[in-house]
Amino acid sequence: MDSMTWDNLLDEYFFAKILRPATESSYRKVVNTFQVFAGADNRPAQVTRQQVLAWRRYVLHQRGLKGVTWNSKIAHMRSVFNLAIEEKILPQTENPFIGVEVNENKNKKKTLTKKQLTTLYLTMGQFEERERRTGDNHRARCALYPTWYWLTVLDTLRYTGMRQNQLLHIRLGDIDLDERRIILCSEGSKNHYEHQVPVVKWLYPRLEILLERAQAAGAKSSDPLFCVNYFTAKTDRGNETDQLQTIKSFFRRLSKECGFDVGPHRFRHTLATE
């Protein structure tokens, strides 16, 4: 027990749980930050409550991170140690990561105002016109092209309130335009449940065009729907990581052009307040 390394401990935890690769990666990142603080020679069996409290002071006061970030780190560590103590993998009888949470002082959720939404779509309209004038020559140089595709992404987020991860997990077969619904699979959902969201009339035409063009590009029913590589010069469709980086690049460029932050979650919060 005393000789167990952090990698061994995580392997035991992942073996006992069924987690997504992205979730496992989150656990590894949190454990790594604790290792950096505690020292390379520190082992899980040596962790004490005093050490955890010292880590809390470091995270909140020296690094200046928010309470919500600290509580997220602690939730990960607490889960790992709960299992290890229950299974007697570690010698501790009490979890040192219990009872060290802090008040989060949550800020008001960030939304997009009507004025910002207008600016956002006007900006995309300007690039749409520029794209029409220049043709395909400059598409590879601008993260906002093809504009028709990214306008479909924006409208899907705006009118459904789905999360970015849910969007990236939508397959062509998940779109049912006859019943006007989108199936959000459990793999992309935060709570691991399958959901359905309606296709409102403003979204329907864009999804119809996206489906037609994706199929014309050779996409099958089981392929991801929101993959910009279908419509660019790139020959491969990439993986989930590539698609994530592409959408991040799009929102980063759009935020720069608009002069304010634009992101998938802001659409979700905006829809919830309307």
Image: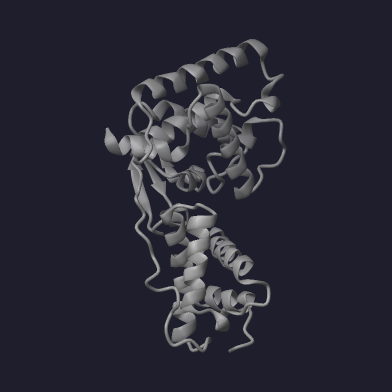
How does the figure colour the protein chain or chains? Answer: one colour
Classify the position of the C terminus by image quarter.
Answer: top left
Instruction: Please give the name of the residue rendered at 57% of the width and 17% of the height, measured from the top-left corner.
Output: 127
> Can residue 17 be seen at all in this image of the molecule?
no
Instruction: Please give the name of the residue rendered at 35% of the width and 44% of the height, measured from the top-left corner.
Output: 107
Up/down of 3 relative to 30, above or below: below
Classify the position of the N terminus by image quarter.
Answer: bottom right
Up/down of 108 relative to 200, above or below: below
How many marks are shown on the rendered structure?
0
> Can residue 37 be seen at all in this image of the molecule?
yes
Q: Closest to the observer: 160 or 103?
A: 103
Up/down of 120 relative to 176, above or below: above
Q: Is residue 204 left or right of residue 221?
A: left
Q: Is residue 205 left or right of residue 145?
A: left
Q: Looking at this rendering, what residue extends furthest in the top direction?
A: 133
Query: Residue 101 location, x and y as percent?
Result: 38, 65
Instruction: Please give the name of the residue rendered at 54% of the width and 54% of the height, measured from the top-left corner.
Output: 63
Query: Residue 233 location, x and y as percent?
Result: 71, 31
Query: Residue 231 location, x and y as percent?
Result: 63, 31
Q: Closest to the observer: 124 or 54?
A: 54
Up/down of 70 relative to 83, above or below: above
Q: Looking at this rendering, what residue extends furthest in the left direction?
A: 274
Query: Residue 172 location, x and y as percent?
Result: 50, 42
Q: Quadrant of residue 143?
A: top right
Instruction: Please give the name of the residue rendered at 33% of the width and 32% of the height, measured from the top-left corner.
Output: 200
